């Protein structure tokens, strides 16, 4: 999901530069990116999406670290591209972000929740038919709401966020593979342009399934992974 936030284009010096995102990516931007996606990227997104969907809570520390590393790589690449050191900047940014995330995992969860909330809020704003140039208002509302929820209900928030992210990665990867068949491109594009609720429903269904699966099958991982972060992992008192 986070890897879709930047695009590289060749410059006059044959060096790649990172283009910052200047607007909230719409459905058309997503379809355009999926059409140019490679088969390897699509398969990687599907596999990672399944991991987030099924093991989001039991492995949330590592998955949140991966998210932080991707964000750090993007920021580092954007800074390094100005000096023709995009790869070095991306690698350095990813390492620094991942290193800072491990001791501050609860704050990292809040950041992930804020990003997910911003995406959900902006998407709902656009689906409601409100002014597109004011989508930032819906994004800010979702960011604050989901970010605060992370500190109140850690386990429930992690399950919800990882399920949502996993579903988005899964659907984007599947779209990328489906677009490799030229005869399916006009059908999918027409269906999504004429029925804007198709993509949200396609993401919502696997997200709910992943949430239910994690809620019912991650009790063991919750005790092991959430003891220090969630505050409820203490050992039972011995019997007298």
Image (tube, rainbow, N blue to C red):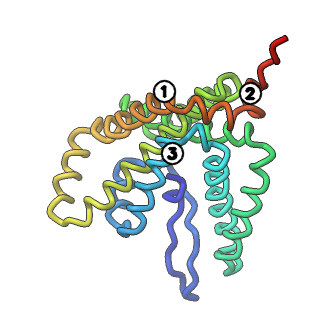
Marks 3 and 2, how far apart at CA: 22 Å
On residue 216, the disc is 1
Quadrant containing the C terminus in the rendered view: top right
Give the residue at x 39% y 49%.
170
Q: Please, what secondary structure does the residue beneath circle 3 have?
A: helix
Of marks 1 and 3, which one's residue comes earlier in the chain? 3
Marks 1 and 3, how far apart at CA: 15 Å
Q: Position of residue 130 (x, y in %)?
A: 41, 31
3 or 2: mark nearer the eye = 2
Q: Please, what secondary structure does the residue beneath circle 1 have?
A: helix
The answer to whether 72 appears left or right of 6 in the picture is right
On residue 233, the disc is 2
Q: Is residue 151 above or below residue 71?
A: above
Q: Position of residue 52 (x, y in %)?
A: 51, 45
On residue 52, the disc is 3
Q: Do the residues labelled 1 and 3 touch (CB within 8 Å)?
A: no
1 or 3: mark nearer the eye = 1
Give the residue at x 40% y 48%.
26
Give the residue at x 67% y 39%.
109
Give the residue at x 74% y 68%.
92
Tell me where residue 198 sits by quadrant: top left
């Amino acid at each position: 999901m986070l890897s879709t936030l930047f695009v590289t284009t060749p410059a006059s010096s044959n060096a790649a530069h990172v283009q910052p995102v200047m607007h909230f990516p719409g459905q058309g931007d997503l379809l355009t990116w999926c059409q140019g996606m490679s088969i390897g990227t699509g398969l990687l997104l599907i596999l990672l999406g399944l991991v987030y969907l099924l093991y989001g809570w039991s492995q949330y520390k590592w998955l949140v670290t991966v998210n932080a590393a991707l964000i750090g790589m993007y920021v580092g690449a954007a800074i390094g591209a100005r000096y023709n050191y995009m790869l070095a900047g991306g690698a350095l940014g990813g390492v620094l972000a991942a290193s800072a995330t491990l001791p501050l995992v609860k704050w990292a969860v809040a950041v992930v929740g804020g990003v997910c909330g911003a995406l959900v809020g902006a998407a709902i704003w656009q689906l409601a038919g409100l002014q597109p140039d004011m989508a930032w208002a819906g994004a800010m509302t979702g960011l604050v709401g989901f970010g605060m929820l992370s500190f109140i209900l850690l386990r429930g928030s992690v399950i919800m966020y990882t399920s949502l992210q996993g579903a988005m990665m899964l659907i984007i990867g599947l779209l990328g593979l489906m677009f490799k068949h030229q005869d399916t491109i006009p059908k999918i594009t027409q269906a999504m342009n004429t029925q804007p609720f198709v993509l949200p429903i396609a993401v919502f269904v696997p997200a709910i399934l992943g949430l239910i699966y994690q809620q019912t099958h991650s009790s063991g991982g919750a005790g092991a992974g959430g003891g220090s972060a969630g505050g409820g992992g203490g050992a039972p008192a011995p019997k007298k």
